[in-house]
Image (cartoon, grey):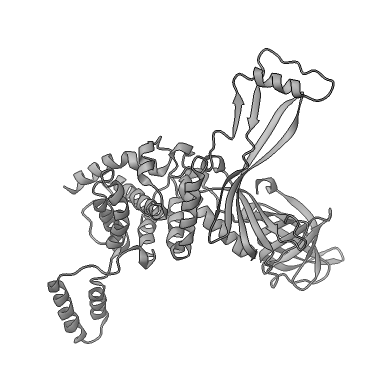
Amino acid sequence: MEKLKDFRKSGLFITSADVEVLGELSLKGGATSLDLYSKEFFNTHLSKDMIGTFHDRSKVSLIDCITMSGLGHGIRGEEHYHFARVFPHFVLFGDEHITSVDRKIVEVSFVVDDASILFYDFDVFGSVIDARPYMERIAEAKEGDRTIMIGEHPLLFYFTGKHDIFSVNTVLGEISATHGISYTFPGPTGINVQNTIRVNIAFPSGQTVDESIKAVIDTLRFLEGVAGRPQNIELLTFGLATTNNEHPSTLDVYWCLSPRRDKDDESQKPHPADLPLQAGRTPEKFAAILASWLERHDVWRHARARYSTASANQNRYNTDRLVGSANMFDIMPISSYPTLVPLSPEMIETRDEAKRAFKALPASPERDSVLNALGRIGKPVLKHKIRARVKLLSDKVGERFPDLELVTDQAVDCRNFYVHGTPSKIDYELHPDQPLFFTDTLEFVFFASDLIEAGWNIIEWINRGTTMSHPFGRYLVNYAGRLDALKRILT
């Protein structure tokens, strides 16, 4: 989408009532606008989608439009005119039009700004240190009458030709990542080869714009977790179905409110070796975990979205982030934790007696509140839910994260203090580092346990070591010291 930045162009646009109106389209992210003018009356309030043709005859489709101002009326001299301003959520450029209800999209392709790190493969491009023997063979094989003169220190650079990084069938369709090479022919000015790594989703059937974007977001959630920070989408294209089995025609997509990484609180750029998954080095493992992760995404969607929102804060910490990080465990699917908590016979008998006693009282908010609390006894509370996720880590690497349950329990107490005013053992004003530790803990436990269930080998990752450029690595290295500080406060 970067190549469309600051785009501005005029043309003719058609409203839902098939009225043709002169307009100017300006692309500025959330300030994108289509300004329309006409001598004749027109109405855009019912125009969910609009199509247009620029003066160079190229086509544009505006999807999910909202009228921001108008319909207005103006007079200049003796001339009357009508005007309106429209905001589209998506702007699609290409050789044909599309609307939000059309199921024409069979493929979507996008580029994230950390793609070269996520899909790092050191050996795809390279150079030959001692190039003379190879240059001599190339010179001998060169066709034509010209003789290639080899200098004292020849250089040879190469691309292996490996375009495919990985490919896997998922519930969304076939997802792949590919190298896309562009180059200019070598000449006196030198050699220029550029690589663009794309993530592609080939759908089993035609999709709408909204369905295609949903698939992009679902995949992006996974990539962001692996990268350890939000991703900026730099390019986005749709491939459209054709009737003659030719290669799909493409539309360039401008997403006006696309996910963006906040530069003011930006995390450091991750080192490829620090990522929990190595897509370039072990593509089969990456592909299998991605497919498994997506297979259960529908039931995990809300909790994962909450994780994405919390971790998107990067280096910015506040109470809302802590509360959100705790709440994402509350909206996990029921299958992710035990539905019943073992109770002793004495506890069950006391609970049931209390229920009978309070049910006999006249109805009141206080009576109902106690009955609700009694009804929750034996059902998992937030601490139990989080402990179930902690166990996934402790069973594999408990020695690296001792007393992790203690930390998550304290995190819930901190959350309860800020949400309900529940008294806490810690004065968070005197110990402001503790809410930060709790936030990091909750986010680490959530996504690490999620990856483990999808097939991630956390032991292998820990044994690789870390430069701490990824949130997981920073948490691992700093855990012991932060745990000691917490224990000193609690004693």
The correct choice, above or below, for 427 with respect to 297 in the image is above
Residue 76 at x, y = what percent? 83, 62
Kindly give the residue lying farthest to the right in the view shown.
78
Return the residue nearer the eye: 390 or 488.
Answer: 390
Residue 206 at x, y = what percent? 66, 65
Q: Is residue 87 left or right of residue 221?
A: right
Q: Does residue 181 appear in the picture of this structure?
A: yes
Image quarter for residue 169?
Answer: bottom right
Which residue sits at x=36%, y=66%? 335
Return the residue nearer the eye: 248 or 382.
Answer: 248
> How many numbered marks have been drawn onto this rendered protein structure?
0
Return the residue nearer the eye: 115 or 143.
Answer: 143
Q: Is residue 240 left or right of residue 405?
A: right
Which residue sits at x=70%, y=21%? 137
Return the residue nearer the eye: 366 or 400.
Answer: 400
Image quarter for residue 464?
Answer: top left
Kindly give the residue lying farthest to the left in the view shown.
346
Kindly give the residue lying farthest to the top in the view shown.
152
Residue 193 at x, y = what percent? 68, 33
The correct choice, above or below, for 488 with respect to 327 in the image is above
Residue 203 at x, y = what percent? 62, 60
Q: Does residue 271 appear in the picture of this structure?
A: no
